[in-house]
Amino acid sequence: MMSPKQISDDRGSSHFRHTPFQIIHVTGNFFRIWSVYSMYRYLNQTGAPVVLFLFCCLLPSSFIFLILQKPWKGRALSNQQIVPSLINGVITALYFVLWGKGLKSCGPLRAILSEYSGAVLGVLSGVLYGRRGHVWKKVGGLVAMLVALFFLSQGWATSSLSPFYILLRNSDTKEEELVTEQALGLMGMMIPVVAGILSALRRVIARRVSLKNQQKKRLHAITITSATCFLFPLAMWDLVTGSSSGKAVELPFSAWAFLATIVFGIILIFYVDNIAEERLHMVFSSPRHLMVAGACIIVMEIAYEMDFSLPGFIVCCLVLGFGIYEATSLERSKKDSSIKSEDGPNGILGNDFDTSPVLPI
């Protein structure tokens, strides 16, 4: 039996070993969020069609994934893996379309935070598979997430609508803008919220289909290729409808907007999230992931001089993080007891994926 000092030393060494992976995770998410803000500015300044832009980014990304992963080589993939991956491509294509539309209409801050709405799948899995004692906690987490989304829809994270700033502002110069922004409401947030749920669904399908990490990467290449194929007719429809309406459909080239979306927003973030899951046991819809994204959003909002309220944003993130924590909580008592029973260095980390039937999002 190991002494408490040896256990603490093992935990300290494990945290030290994870430091490079944590740096990779923070850096990768920072560049991904940077690419989102670049994409938002490009779409707003040029008026380019969202679907056409995303298709032009997914097309080279699919080729890069196929070249890197070579799904046709190695151990043959079964039909039980390929068919769900192709179906997952349809879900991925719908996710990109809805998320792009939501980004253009709601802004990057709301679009990014709405992605965490996929944690509602944790509520659903808890209701279906969890113990009854945990159901009310998950329902409470769902209510907290809805409250956070309501705050975001009302503009709490913007300086023009945040109650923290409205109380201090006495001028009427922003009156018209205030009415316009308030018209967004919860219905205006539904597009990025549905996109967040689809994003969580595609992650769950990918995790359930692939048994090993290498298989997951190969199947992801098939999924992105499938999404590109399904997005092709939608992009062509944008071209046809734009031409028939008499408006010239243009897609101005911006090297940074395209490269950032391809490299950081699609390719790099997949490997970064994969490292976070395998090495740090951190899934996307988790409070820790939200904390990293929130810090990156603050930097980008200030750098891009957006309409931003730091106090309102912190309130929204705290409420959303609490909701995610409760909605995706596993049976922590069982997990803690299993960790304590395994005092070896391999047992300290635990396993966030196998201690409960609740779906990791």
Image (spheres, rainbow, N blue to C red):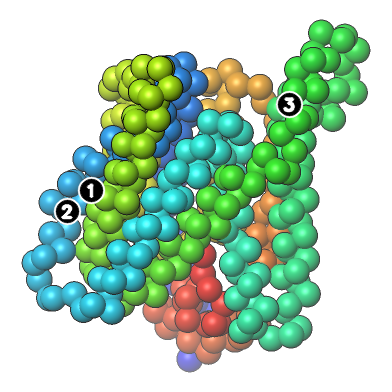
Q: Earlier in the sequence, mark 2 or mark 3?
A: 2
Q: Is residue 78 above or below residue 191?
A: below
Query: Marks 3 and 1: CB-CB under 8 Å?
Result: no
Q: Is residue 230 left or right of residue 19?
A: left
Type of the residue with mark 3: Glu
Q: Which residue is mark 2?
A: 66
Q: Is residue 9 left or right of residue 149?
A: left
- At x 55% / y 82%, what residue is drawn? 356
Type of the residue with mark 2: Leu
Q: Position of residue 359 (x, y in %)?
A: 53, 73
Q: Quadrant of residue 81?
A: bottom left
- At x 72% / y 79%, what residue is drawn? 134
Query: Are there few (<14), some (14-19), or many (20+) residues within 10 Å of tag 2?
Result: many
Query: Marks 2 and 3: CB-CB under 8 Å?
Result: no
On residue 78, the disc is none
Could you tell me how far apart the alpha carbons at marks 3 and 1 are, in whole angstroms? 37 Å
Could you tell me how far apart the alpha carbons at marks 2 and 3 are, in whole angstroms? 43 Å
- Provide the secondary structure element on which disc 3 rests: helix
Front residue of 165/249: it is 249
Front residue of 290/236: it is 236
Q: Is residue 190 above or below residue 275?
A: above
Query: Marks 2 and 1: CB-CB under 8 Å?
Result: yes
Q: Earlier in the sequence, mark 3 or mark 1?
A: 1
On residue 181, the disc is 3
**Residue 117 in sight here:** yes
Type of the residue with mark 1: Ser
Question: Can you tell which of label 2 and label 3 is closer to the viewer?
Answer: 3
Q: Which residue is mark 1?
A: 62
- At x 40% / y 17%, what residue is drawn? 246
Query: Are there few (<14), some (14-19), or many (20+) residues within 10 Å of tag 3?
Result: some
Front residue of 236/331: it is 236
